[in-house]
Amino acid sequence: MENELCKRIADGDEEAFASLFNRYYPLLRPFILKFTHSADKTEEMLQETFLRVWLNRDQLPEVENLQAWIFTIASRQCLHAIRTELNHRKKLAALQVRESDREASTPLDVTQLAEISRLVSQAVNNMPPQRQRIYRMSREEGLKPAAIAEALSLSVATVKNALVTALKDIRHHLGAAGHTISLVFILIMFF
Amino acid sequence: MQKDAIRYLIGQYMNDELTAQQQAELLQLLGQHEERELIEMLREMMEAESVGATAVDADAMQASLQRVLSADKPVAEMPGRVLTISRRWRWVAAAACLLAVGITGYVLLNKKSTTVPVAATSNPYKNDVQPGGQKAMLTLADGKQIVLDSAGNGLLAQQGNAQVVKEGAGLKYQSAGSGRSDVTYNTLSTPRGGEYKLILPDGSKVWLNSASTLRYPTAFTGSTREVALEGEGYFEVTKLAAKPFRVITKTQFIEVLGTHFNVNAYSDEAATKTTLLEGKVKVMNDERSAILKPGEQASVSQSSQKSQPITVQTVDVEETVAWTNGQFIFREQRIESIMKQISRWYNVEVAFAGKPTQEGFTATIPRSVPVSKVLRYLELTTLVHFKIDGNRITVLP
């Protein structure tokens, strides 16, 4: 059943993703809240975790232990956060950095989300016409791969391939702009 | 073991108790260790924490979901679609809320393992009662009273050399000026259905559960730090070796240097219970004393006779302090004891019709849900049933 859900998410089914989100968000929140000591940071960290899941959705059907996979993504965020915070405290102690000089230690605030949206648009505009069309039908119109295939007289496999490639394009473009979204490293741990 | 050291330090970090030296140590250890091992360790800690998941703010959660889902959409939106989507999401939000509660409620069913019944949509009770919240009353030295809730922030009053500042759902004393002045006493009281957090002038933190009162000086100028408690409080005492911290209750007093502990001194409970989470405390009455180790609980009978024996036993600490994390955790608890907690938090009267079951109940339930949800979970065991009539809950076999 979990595998069925993962397949639907990989096909871009927002409702399927919502049910994954609603299942794991409450499980992750207590730990992250204790970890960040802040409701706002908790929200940002959860959002970033699930953004990573979503932008790597094409890989979900191959994930064997979904909870472990999601928790690992969140753990990585936590590790990043604790390092950032400890380094900041060290600087603060050494250089008497004022609190107001603090860099945004949260990895994904609202402006960064807007930035990600902008970069996604760029990446989509740079795609070859057919891939772009397929991606837009999936994300803007919410069509399933089968429906897109029928509308464009293509095979379902072709549509799915185009969607996977589109996601790779997007991750690559985000990566080039400094937003590492790829989970290659985490996947190594589970296969 | 280095791993244990890292785990310990991360725990300290989460408790916000890292010393400057430990900070440097942790940073260094994090730099030396293999990334995947660290991530694996954090994941294990996360798994452990996720067991007692609590209900979450469904609106915030759905807003978050929408932001994630819109992040990979090319920016141009078709305006007609937005509305239809948001309508649909409302249903998902409602379902998510039920689910979040469902995860925790499920724990209860472990004992009588039947199939999990899905909560029916109609409410079988006559009415419902909403949970308590951040409410308290502050009485200043001159007798002036201030009603506190979770709204509004800022300076409330000047008491001697201390400023009383309200921060969200909590109260903080900070010293202002160093001029001499007399020690004044303030009192913080929570009603039934209320809880509140307080930071004392020495930085010690106190969480007050429902129907509780704490009296304390606005500055700790003497050789000891003394506060008086009625009801239940959880204390995180700042370490000051030269100034022991004392909690005085009707039946006993507790002396500590700097530790975390919970004191349950409700007058309607059979005994005053002191539970130690960290450090060391000494529990005393007129003739006896006992020193607790972490995980131990001292009980002193509430009987009017002086110098009751102090019994010490090992307990489930998580269950004792669940209320500070917004949860009810019941482990093999009798229904009478559960109903006392419900009565305080929901500000309801409880009556028993017939002889209640002697079986113990085990459950983890968020304190943020209406009382009907709590009762329904308990009913799923079929060992008890409830009737709600206004502010009165009747427990039936």
Image: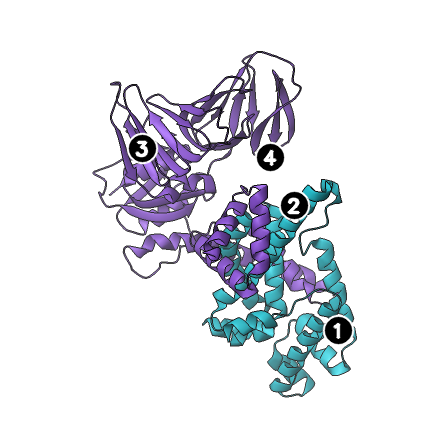
Chain colours: A cyan, B purple
Q: Residue at x 65, y 80 (%)?
A: A148
* Residue B195 in the figure: left or right of residue B165: left
Depth check, front residue: A109 or A140: A109
The residue positioned 73% from the left and 78% from the top of the image is A133
Quadrant of the rendered structure where residue B285 is? top left
Disc 3 packing (10 Å; few <14; some 14–19; many ≥20): many
- The residue positioned 29% from the left and 31% from the top of the image is B299
Q: In this figure, which residue is indicated by the disc labeled 4?
A: B168
Residue B79 in view here: no
With B367 as the anchor, is A171 left or right in this view? Answer: right
Tell which tag, 2 or 1, sits nearer the viewer.
2
Circle 3 SS class = strand
Q: Which disc is residue A89 wearing?
A: 2
Q: Position of residue B231 (x, y in %)?
A: 39, 27
Mark nearer the N terminus (4 vs 3): 4
Question: Residue B157: percent from the left, percent from the top?
Answer: 63, 20
Q: Nearer the viewer, mark 2 or mark 3?
A: 2
Q: Amino acid at mark 3?
A: Ala
| Image mark 4: chain | B
Look at the numbered disc 2 and give the secondary structure of its residue. Answer: helix
Disc number at residue B298?
A: 3
Does label 3 lie on the same chain as label 1? no
Per the rendering, the mark at residue A93 is none
* Amino acid type, mark 2: Arg
Q: Are marks 2 and 1 in contact (CB under 8 Å)?
A: no
Q: Residue A144 is drawn in which quadrant?
A: bottom right
The front one of A115 and B273 is B273
